[in-house]
Image (cartoon, rainbow, N blue to C red):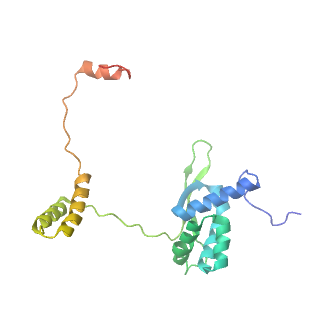
Amino acid sequence: MRHNKKRLQLNRFTSWHKATLKSLVRSLVIYESIKTTLHRAKAVKSLAEKLITLAKANTLSAKREAYKILGDHKLVGILFSEIGPRFSKRVGGYTRIINLARRRGDDAQVVIFELTEQKPKLKKVKKTKADKTELQGDKEIEGGSEASSVEENKVVTETAVKEKPPVIKRPTKKFIGGLRNIFRKKGDSL
């Protein structure tokens, strides 16, 4: 009899089912938040939690077990060096499922499947024009040392590349010119 053999089949045969789960777990380790269907998220949740529990143990045998599932040494390294220590104080509940809308084509429930504790994202600070002028002013003052001027030269050229060129206003086209563009074919020279 088939007691306690329940699993979410996902309408796949065994090897395809295992490949789907491994792919979802790999994506979760890489991106820490993935968008998928509700049934896939429920199916992969136990496997993801098992991997994070292994990462908390941080032993050689745990790394080998994780490698059997992930199949990539870089992903195992990420799991054990970044994700495992993040959950060291937590006993369970490493992942969460956040409901989104239903998919238009097949009406499947779409969810965000993510780790509960994510690494903080660093915000990029934009340089203002005043900062750019200070860099250029410092460059003119320090004209004696070549090494510092080369480093600052790189900074100045990087900021110069990011600036947008001034927008040139073109005269508005007349009515016939606008019609000509609408009906123009690719090979026309007019």
Q: Is residue 111 above or below residue 60?
A: above
The quarter of the displayed image where residue 145 is located = bottom left
The answer to whether any part of residue 86 appears in the image is: yes
Side (left or right) of 138 relative to 56: left
Q: How many marks?
A: 0
Q: Position of residue 24 (x, y in %)?
A: 61, 59
User: Residue at 63% across / 64% down in the picture?
Assistant: 70
Q: Nearer the viewer, residue 190 or 99?
A: 190
Q: Is residue 70 above or below residue 54?
A: above
Q: Position of residue 129 (x, y in %)?
A: 18, 58
User: Residue at 53% across / 63% down in the picture?
Assistant: 30
Which residue ends up furthest to the right in the rendered image?
1
Q: Quadrant of the N terminus?
A: bottom right
User: Residue at 65% across / 60% down in the picture?
Assistant: 22
Q: Position of residue 43 (x, y in %)?
A: 67, 60
The quarter of the displayed image where residue 169 is located = top left
Q: Is residue 163 above or below residue 175?
A: below
Side (left or right) of 98 relative to 148: right
Q: Nearer the viewer, residue 113 or 123?
A: 123
Q: Quadrant of the C terminus?
A: top left
Q: Position of residue 106 (x, y in %)?
A: 62, 43
The answer to whether any part of residue 9 appears in the image is: no
User: Residue at 75% across / 61% down in the picture?
Assistant: 7
The quarter of the displayed image where residue 188 is located = top left
